[in-house]
Amino acid sequence: MKLALIGDPVEHSASPRLHRAFLEDADIDGSYVAIKVARGEGATAIRRLRLEEYTGCNVTYPLKEEALSVCDTLTEEAQRARSVNTIFFGRSIVGTNTDGIGARGAIEALLDEPVALKRIGVLGYGATARAILAELHDNDAYTFVWGRDAKRAGEICRQYEAKTWPDQNPPEVVLSTLPPEATLPEGLVMQLQQPDLVIDANYGARSMLARHLHRDVVPGDAMLEAQARASFDFWLAHLDRVAGT
């Protein structure tokens, strides 16, 4: 089983460690490597991996939208998010997105209850945010979106039946998909002192949100592990289908 991660940066990624452990636990002879691929080169890299007989790959920033164009088939999750973070190479190139599943799994584990009817805010409106909003919508959460570009935030709200960020009474759970270097307006920083739970999608040294907010913030390790497990299960399921044909 030959697997890879593509994106930029990838040096910090915990995905190789996680997936090598999954392979070992499943007693599967395989490999997982991280390959730095610059913006604009995603489609070429994916086609190359297929020619080199990779089983599948994960796709991270900034290539998740680029991966859409090279997939022959998209799952409902990828279609809803309009981005791909997991690809299987079979008779065709199949793309899905497990970011939303990872986020929901992390939130539910931390709350010890389902996300249904919870007020959950998402900071950002990029590929990861869209996947999360789609998953939360499908699981009956009330969602809110913050972004610097009010027009883009409004468009995302309409697409995922979310609401724009409230001036009063901020959500009880907040998940940030913003890059580590992002700066937040003072008013938002003050609001983010109130939620019961704040999660940063970044992890490790890239998880900077706690420093910006001066409060406890859960880093994205649990999110990553949950979406990585969903990706691995996706590859195994497709391998089983291929073996059964």
Image: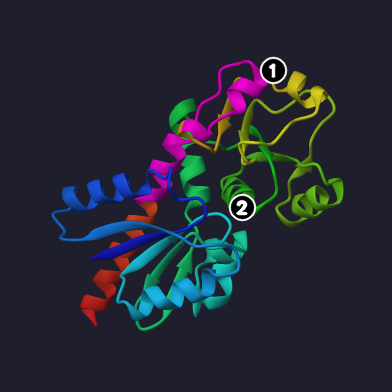
Q: Give the amino acid type for the residue marked by disc 1 in the picture.
A: Gln
Question: In terms of depth relative to the viewer, which is nearer, 32 or 143?
Answer: 32
**Residue pictured at 38% horizontal, 73% vertical:** 49
Q: Indicate the secondary structure of the residue bearing disc 2.
A: helix
Residue 230 x, y percent position in the rendering: 38, 52
| The N terminus - image quarter | bottom left
| The C terminus - image quarter | bottom left
Residue 129 x, y percent position in the rendering: 63, 48
In the figure, 66 relative to 223: above or below? below
User: Which quadrant of the view contains residue 179?
Assistant: top right
**Mark 2, residue position:** 134
**Mark 1, residue position:** 194
Q: Which of marks 1 and 2 precedes in the sequence?
A: 2
Task: Give the magenta-colored segment's residue range.
Answer: 205-229
Tell whether position 63 is magenta: no
Task: Answer left or right for 41 relative to 163.
Answer: left
Question: In terms of depth relative to the viewer, which is nearer, 11 or 2?
Answer: 11
**Residue pictured at 61% horizontal, 28% vertical:** 209
Q: Main secondary structure of the magenta part?
A: helix
Colour mapping used in the image: rainbow
In the figure, 13 relative to 42: above or below? above
Disc 2 or disc 1, which is closer to the eye?
1
Tell me how far mark 2 sits from mark 1, CA to CA: 25 Å
Residue 118 in view of the camera? no
Question: In terms of depth relative to the viewer, which is nearer, 121 or 188?
Answer: 188
Q: Indicate the secondary structure of the residue bearing disc 1.
A: loop
